[in-house]
Structure formats: C-alpha cells, structure tokens
Amino acid sequence: MTFCKHTTLELLPEKKKRVRCRQCHLTMDSEELGDGYCPECFETSGKRQYEFEEMETEGRGVARYRCQECDAIVESA
C-alpha cells in the first residue's frame, strides 16, 4: 500500500432515497419508479406491483470525498 496525503479530493454526491419492491425485492432509486409500479414485476408477470419499502440511506449528514490520486473514499467527521 502506498502512502497518500489525499490532497486532491472530489466531493461525491449524496446517495438518493432508495426503495425495494416487496414482491421481487428489486432495489432502485425512488426517482426511477416513473409510473409508480415495479418495472421488473410488470415485465415478468404483467402485474403492476405498487408496494415498496423505503431503504435507509447510510451516513446521512456525512460528506464523502474520493481522492483523485489513490481513489480512496474519505468521509467527513
């Protein structure tokens, strides 16, 4: 492992709210729902499943950075 002082950092975007289908367990961003039903269930069975559970996002309020020199992820305290 090489020594890096992490002098060149890039701010990573916050993770978006994610949801999981209660039927097939497909996990996706809530913005991807579009019509409000699970696209995987609709494609496989033709049924429109509207039941989702919200997934907890990790590290709320913590800024995450990527070092551009060594690709390490650094979190703020």
Image (tube, helix red, strand yellow):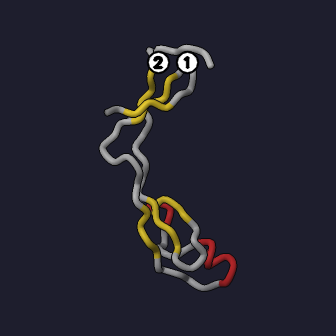
Q: Quadrant of residue 53?
A: bottom left
**According to the image, label 2 marks what residue?**
6
Q: Which amino acid type is shown beneath numbered disc 1? A: Glu
Image x and y of residue 47, in percent: 60, 85
CB of mark 1 within 8 Å of CB of mark 2?
yes
Query: For the residues marked 1 and 2, what is the alpha-carbon distance in whole angstroms?
Result: 7 Å
Find residue 57 and report its horizontal and vertical position in percent.
Answer: 40, 54
Label 1: which residue? 69
Query: What residue is rendered at 34% in x and 32% in y?
Result: 76
Q: From the viewer's perspective, is residue 7 above or below residue 45?
A: above
Residue 42 position (above or below residue 72):
below
Label 1: state its secondary structure: loop
Quadrant of the rendered image containing residue 70: top right
Q: Check disc 2 and report its element: helix, strand or loop.
A: loop
- Quarter of the picture holding the C terminus: top left
Q: Amino acid at mark 2?
A: His
- Residue 9 location (% of width, % of height): 44, 22
